[in-house]
Image (spheres, grey):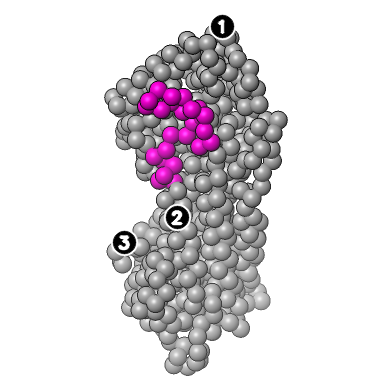
Amino acid sequence: MQTVVLGTTGTTAADVVAVARSNARVVIGEDAVAALAAAREIVDALAAKPDPVYGVSTGFGALATRHIGPELRAQLQRNIVRSHAAGMGPRVEREVVRALMFLRLKTVCSGHTGVRPEVARTMADVLNAGITPVVHEYGSLGCSGDLAPLSHCALTLMGEGEAEGPDGTVRAAGALLAEHGITPVELREKEGLALLNGTDGMLGMLIMALADLDVLYKSADVTAALSLEALLGTAKVLAPELHAIRPHPGQAASAANMAAVLAGSGLTGHHQDDAPRVQDAYSVRCAPQVAGAGRDTLAHARTVAERELAAAVDNPVVLPDGRVESNGNFHGAPVAYVLDFLAVAAADLGSIAERRTDRLLDKNRSHGLPPFLADDAGVDSGLMIAQYTQAALVSELKRLAVPASADSIPSSAMQEDHVSMGWSAARKLRTAVANLRRVIAVELYAATRAVELREGLTPAPASRAVVEAVRKAGVEGPGPDRFLAPDLAAADAFVGEGRLVAAVEAVTGPLA
């Protein structure tokens, strides 16, 4: 089992994915333990003074004006967790909750939160035991952190609420902790606040979306190339010198990927011999420009994610000089924006893929392919309704592209009067990524069938490798009508598991 060591300087996207999806073991480094202890000494010293310090000896948010005496501070910390664990709606996915918990632990280990080392160890123990708090869909406004989701996680650390065990069964959190020999934490000054005041949920979902979209953008380059080939289009537009004069790096990468897939094709440009076309349609000719713009958006989003991974997001924070200062670093705007940007890019990539699919199915624009790629058009409907499904997915992608971060609903008696809605942006991006994967799967299904129907012409070696691999994966080729849903599901899995990219790279080498 992979082990991830958390120190004081943050973590990596790969580590987040490993913990969230592969159950990597989490270990707290010695430097983090020392930083935790040093910061806690500062908090304890401030707690002993009569002067009020936010988060240590005051209420929270709009209630920060009340000074809380020592005898009530433990209750204050318990109460903030219990009251803020107010989520509603369906359960959030296990991988999202694990990413959320791990990233909160990452900030705790920075030494800027004032949390005791034993609390951090309990967080790691819960992750390593495979215990996953029940977190609900609704409850975060993406400001003052992902409050409700993180509070449900903190509730589990206290041995309260519900959690899912490693066997997938939801039970009382206290019983699960006891079975794994984990002692519930008794929160002290500032600790309750520190456990729920971060952008960890939206960041975790951003990191996993970036990992998935990296595969999907390569997959989209492959399916675009297959469609170009099936439509007897020209590969001349992929020449690197054409893309060098408009130097967007994503565009050049997508064009290079498509050119690699099409190397050695006997289909591209064939139309010039018997059905002259001056140029291909935009959905074919401009594929690198559209996918490339999305790739550049991914690059910007990665930069934001890397900065957040190196950040300590809490309020107030403990500084090395002994100050405990209030701040606004918990605001989710930087993450929320890129989550929305990626949803826009995903919608556009899905839209252009659907247009290519529609072209493959239309006998008036497919340059000799049978209507709907049917075996006996009229008796057979072919892939007509597969394109309907794809169109429905694209329509939802467009709705999901409406930005969440443009909205703000004031809360906490107007103390928190501008919020990011970053959690909502992240939740809809997860749906958008899943829909984009399905859209690409439908184009793959149509394009591989169309390539096979070009009898007498030899596709590129990479294209032949894709056709062979996808057929072995249970996606049937041309023939009479049959139950399509299983084929589409198999194509979806083939794309999502990275097998499409792997089939191409076995021929071409690594894609960009």
Residue at image mark 1: 71
Amino acid type assigned to the residue bearing label 3 in the image = Pro
Q: Which residue does the image show at 58% across and 37% down from the upper left? A: 143
Residue at image mark 3: 510
Q: Quadrant of residue 396?
A: bottom right
Q: CA distance from mark 1 to mark 2?
A: 48 Å
Given this view, does label 2 or label 3 mark the residue nearer the observer?
2
Residue at far top of view: 71
Q: Pointers 1 and 2 in contact (CB under 8 A)? A: no
Report helix, strand or loop for mark 1. Answer: helix
Let me know if residue 320 is in the magenta part.
Answer: yes
Tell me which numbered mark, 1 or 2, is placed earlier along the sequence: 1
Report helix, strand or loop for mark 2. Answer: helix
Residue at image mark 2: 300
Residue 113 is labelled as: none
Amino acid type assigned to the residue bearing label 1 in the image = Glu
